[in-house]
Each structure stands twice: as structure tokens, then as C-alpha cells.
């Protein structure tokens, strides 16, 4: 069933409460995935309990109801969840999953406690293992995917709250980012003005746009956040820091983060010094060879390879996605004009046009990204100039185009509009 939009029908304090509960649910599941991946099964189970509890509580609030001070969801609790959100079959399946978390195992995993007098005396580490925890992880994953689907339908009810990074990390005393590599056509405030002028199919305002420091992303206020600075982003310091971690957390908890042009997160802008730095994690490969002799001693000449491997880039290290780079031997250097075509997720018209492509996602075997725009016959072969890359419960929209000119900027605005009107439905069901 298609979830109904109920968020704007409940009181403002309930709306904020619902957003908080959803973020806790998603964040808890991310913690469960992490702990399972490092063999901490009792911690994984504890976070699964946490996440599943916030699942039913968030939907209860979204339905305009309240819940009692308790951990377990009874059939009466499930009945408080609107039938506009869960079908009868989905409600039964959700309750079956929630009922499998016994109070004894929950208390052991979360509090390290067994009720006095029980016959079970094993420690949490002995009670939980990969074999009995992995099935629970998969079951709760269904709850999370269902909640994300419902949540996206709430977030994309116009006017959609969209934030544009202002250049600050948290405070006005900082030196805001003014570096726009491959995204120079519009400054941050101009993005906001242009987005405010976009209408939906009923000629009403589609977006409620505002500038925001990175620190505000943690509030869960914005359905979409745009980084207008292209390959750069604001940071405290010159290395990966709280700015990047906050952005990643926003995406992981269900947000959609649109990077405006080029390779994302290549440069950090230090808001303390007002300068930018190349942000890659690698040491150049050094090779030596004997080239001459001086008084009988060999002299070594050093050849330094400065090619940046994909693994050194944040896009590869965190999102496991690679882009196409320059190939001087093929005369592929800098932005290249190619034919592009919208994918069906953006509408059935499948718009075809030309654009200057720069750092498009390369064709690869991956279940982590959903192409929004492709170029089937570029100099690289098939590439994806605009792609939605799944990260946790949210998406990074990688814009592999050069936005120094108006044409590509207007194309991206059109893509954002289409994504907000129809494309979000596909992202909501992407798993």
C-alpha cells in the first residue's frame, strides 16, 4: 500500500517528536549494523531492541496518538497505528517481529541484567552469537525499510523543507566558505532564492528553502540539503572533522544530501582560517632507480607518482563508489560535453539533452546506487552524471557535472524538482 501523508495533520510538537523518534530508530539500526560487522553481537542485539521500539512509537505519534511508558508493543499498541500507514498484513508482520524480543534477552543485552531467580546464568557474550543475531538483524531491517518508506512520503509533502549549506559549520564568527570548485554559477544565497521560486504541479511553492550551518543538520529539519560549494565543504580544521561527520550522520539517518558539482568532499574549507585544503588520504608512491654514479657511489633519482587512487577519496572510502577521472591519453581532461538522458525515476519523458560532465560515476557492479541521469555513449563508455548513492537510510546525490555555467545549473534544479515530485517514491522503496 502507498502510505498516506499525515505529518502535517498533527500538532507541531508531535511533528518534532515524530522526527526525533525516526532519527533514533534509524541511528539505532546503523549502530546495530556496525556492531554486527565487528562481531559485537550482544551490542548489536541491544541496538536492534532500541531501534524496533522506536519504530512502533514513531508511527504511533505520526498517527496522532500517544504511547504508555513501556518497551513492548501489545496488539492494543499496534492498533493505535493508523491504517493509512500500515496495512493489516503489515501490522501483523510488524507485531510478530516486535514480539520476538523477549524481556529477558532485552534486559540482558541492554542492561546486563537477569531477573533474580531465573535459571539462566550465561553472560551476554555467551548468550548472543552470529547465528542467533543475524536473523534478528534481517527481521528488523524490514521494519526499518517500511519506516523509511513511510517517512519519505511525509518529508516530501509540499512545501518541502530544503536547506542550503550557508558556508558556516556552527557560528557566525567563523569565516564562511567562499570556494566553489566546479559550481561557480550560483552562490549559496542565490540557490535559496531560485529554489523558493520553483512551483509544484498546482502552481504552489514546492520548497521552503533556507540557509543552514552544518550543525543544524542534526535536527532532522530538512528533507533535502544542498551543498552549493561543489567539490568543497565547510569544516572545522583542514582534515576530516565534525563537518564531514555531521553530513554523513544526516545522510545515514535518512537525509538526502545533494552535492552540486564535481567530486564531492575533495576539498575542506577551514572556517577558522578561511582557506581550503585538498582532502585526500594517501601517500604518493615513491620509486627509485639508479641513474648515475658519483665518485663510485650510485646516485638514485626519485620518480614520484601523484595519481590519486580512488581508495584515497571520501566517495570511495565511505560510499564505495568510483568516478571517472581525466585520461590525457584519450584527450579526456576537465569537463566534457556529452549527450545525457534522464532515467525513468525522474519521469516518463526521459529527457535527452547535452551537458558538461565532470567526475561522473563509472559503470560498476553495485547495489548501492540508483542512476538518475546516464550518458550511454560518452568517451568513457556508459557513465552516470547524476546518481543517488545509498548510505545508511539516506542518499548522497552525486552530481558529476560542471556547474560553472547556467545550463548545467538549470538542469540540476530541474532534476531536484523532479526528484521531489516523483523520484522520491523510488528512493523510498530502494533497499
Image (spheres, grey):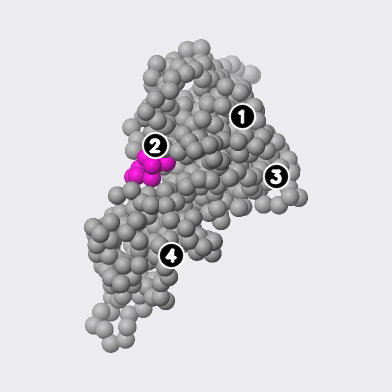
Residue that sits furthest to the bottom in the current view: 117
Indicate the quadrant where residue 273 lies.
top right
Whether the magenta-drawn stretch holds residue 313 is answered as: no
Q: Earlier in the sequence, mark 3 or mark 4?
A: 4
- Distance CA(mark 4)–CA(mark 1): 43 Å
Which residue does the numbered mark 3 point to in the structure image? Answer: 271
- Distance CA(mark 1)–CA(mark 3): 19 Å
Looking at the image, residue 311 sits to the left or right of residue 173; the answer is left
User: SS class of the residue under badge 2?
Assistant: strand
User: SS class of the residue under badge 4?
Assistant: loop
Q: Residue at x 31, y 67 (%)?
A: 79
Q: Residues within 10 Å of mark 4 (few under 14, many from 20)?
A: some
Q: Earlier in the sequence, mark 4 or mark 1?
A: 4
Which residue does the numbered mark 1 point to in the structure image? Answer: 183
Residue interval drawn in magenta: 424-431
- Distance CA(mark 4)–CA(mark 2): 35 Å
Which mark, residue 64?
4
Q: Residues within 10 Å of mark 2 (few under 14, many from 20)?
A: many
Mark 4 in CB contact with mark 2 (< 8 angstroms): no
Q: Nearer the viewer, residue 326 or 353?
A: 353
Q: How many marks?
A: 4
Q: Nearer the viewer, residue 130 or 298?
A: 130
Numbered disc in front, either 4 or 1: 4
Looking at the image, residue 378 sits to the left or right of residue 173; the answer is left
Q: Residues within 10 Å of mark 1 (few under 14, many from 20)?
A: many
Indicate the quadrant where residue 142 lies.
bottom left
Q: Main secondary structure of the magenta part?
A: helix
Q: Earlier in the sequence, mark 1 or mark 3?
A: 1
User: SS class of the residue under badge 1?
Assistant: loop
Q: Residues within 10 Å of mark 3 (few under 14, many from 20)?
A: many
Which mark, residue 369?
2
Above/below status of 147 relative to 183: below
Amino acid at each position: 500500500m502507498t502510505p498516506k501523508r499525515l505529518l502535517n495533520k498533527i500538532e507541531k510538537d508531535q511533528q518534532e517528536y515524530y522526527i526525533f523518534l525516526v532519527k533514533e530508530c534509524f541511528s539505532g539500526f546503523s549502530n546495530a549494523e556496525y556492531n554486527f560487522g565487528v562481531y559485537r553481537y550482544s551490542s548489536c542485539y541491544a541496538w536492534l531492541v532500541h531501534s524496533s521500539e522506536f519504530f512502533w512509537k514513531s508511527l504511533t505519534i505520526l498517527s496522532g496518538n500517544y504511547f504508555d511508558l513501556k518497551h513492548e508493543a501489545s496488539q492494543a499498541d499496534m492498533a493505535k497505528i493508523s491504517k493509512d500507514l500500515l496495512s493489516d498484513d503489515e501490522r501483523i508482520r510488524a507485531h510478530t517481529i516486535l514480539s520476538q524480543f523477549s524481556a529477558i534477552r532485552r534486559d540482558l543485552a541492554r542492561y546486563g541484567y537477569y531477573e533474580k531467580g531465573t535459571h539462566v546464568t550465561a553472560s551476554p557474550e555467551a548468550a548472543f552469537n552470529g547465528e542467533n543475531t543475524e536473523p534478528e538483524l534481517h527481521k528488523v531491517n524490514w521494519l526499518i525499510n517500511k519506516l523509511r518508506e513511510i517517512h519519505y512520503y511525509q518529508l516530501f509533502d509540499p512545501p518541502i523543507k530544503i536547506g542550503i549549506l550557508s558556508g558556516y559549520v556552527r557560528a557566525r564568527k567563523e569565516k564562511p566558505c567562499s570556494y566553489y570548485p566546479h559550481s561557480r554559477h550560483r552562490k549559496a544565497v542565490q540557490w535559496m532564492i531560485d529554489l523558493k521560486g520553483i512551483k509544484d504541479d498546482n502552481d504552489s511553492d514546492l520548497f521552503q528553502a533556507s540557509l543552514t550551518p552544518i550543525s543544524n543538520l542534526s535536527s532532522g529539519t530538512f528533507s533535502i540539503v544542498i551543498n552549493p560549494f561543489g567539490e568543497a565543504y565547510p569544516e572545522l580544521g583542514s582534515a576530516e572533522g565534525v563537518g564531514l561527520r555531521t553530513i554523513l550522520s544526516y545522510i545515514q539517518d535518512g537525509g538526502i544530501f545533494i552535492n552540486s558539482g564535481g567530486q564531492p568532499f575533495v576539498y575542506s574549507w577551514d572556517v577558522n582560517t578561511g582557506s581550503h585544503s585538498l582532502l585526500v588520504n594517501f601517500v604518493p608512491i615513491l620509486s627509485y632507480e639508479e641513474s648515475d654514479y658519483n665518485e663510485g657511489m650510485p646516485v638514485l633519482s626519485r620518480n614520484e607518482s601523484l595519481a590519486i587512487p580512488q581508495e584515497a577519496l571520501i566517495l570511495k572510502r565511505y560510499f564505495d563508489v568510483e568516478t571517472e577521472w581525466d585520461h590525457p591519453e584519450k584527450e579526456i581532461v576537465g569537463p566534457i560535453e556529452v549527450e545525457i538522458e534522464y532515467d525513468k525515476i525522474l519521469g516518463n519523458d526521459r529527457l535527452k539533452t547535452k551537458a558538461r560532465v565532470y567526475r561522473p560515476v563509472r559503470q560498476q557492479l553495485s547495489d548501492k546506487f540508483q542512476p538518475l541521469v546516464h550518458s550511454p555513449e560518452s568517451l568513457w563508455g556508459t557513465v552516470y552524471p547524476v546518481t543517488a548513492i545509498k548510505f545508511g537510510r539516506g542518499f548522497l546525490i552525486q552530481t558529476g557535472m560542471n556547474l560553472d555555467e547556467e545550463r548545467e545549473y538549470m538542469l540540476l534544479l530541474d532534476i531536484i524538482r523532479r526528484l521531489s515530485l516523483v523520484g522520491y517514491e523510488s528512493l523510498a522503496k530502494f533497499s
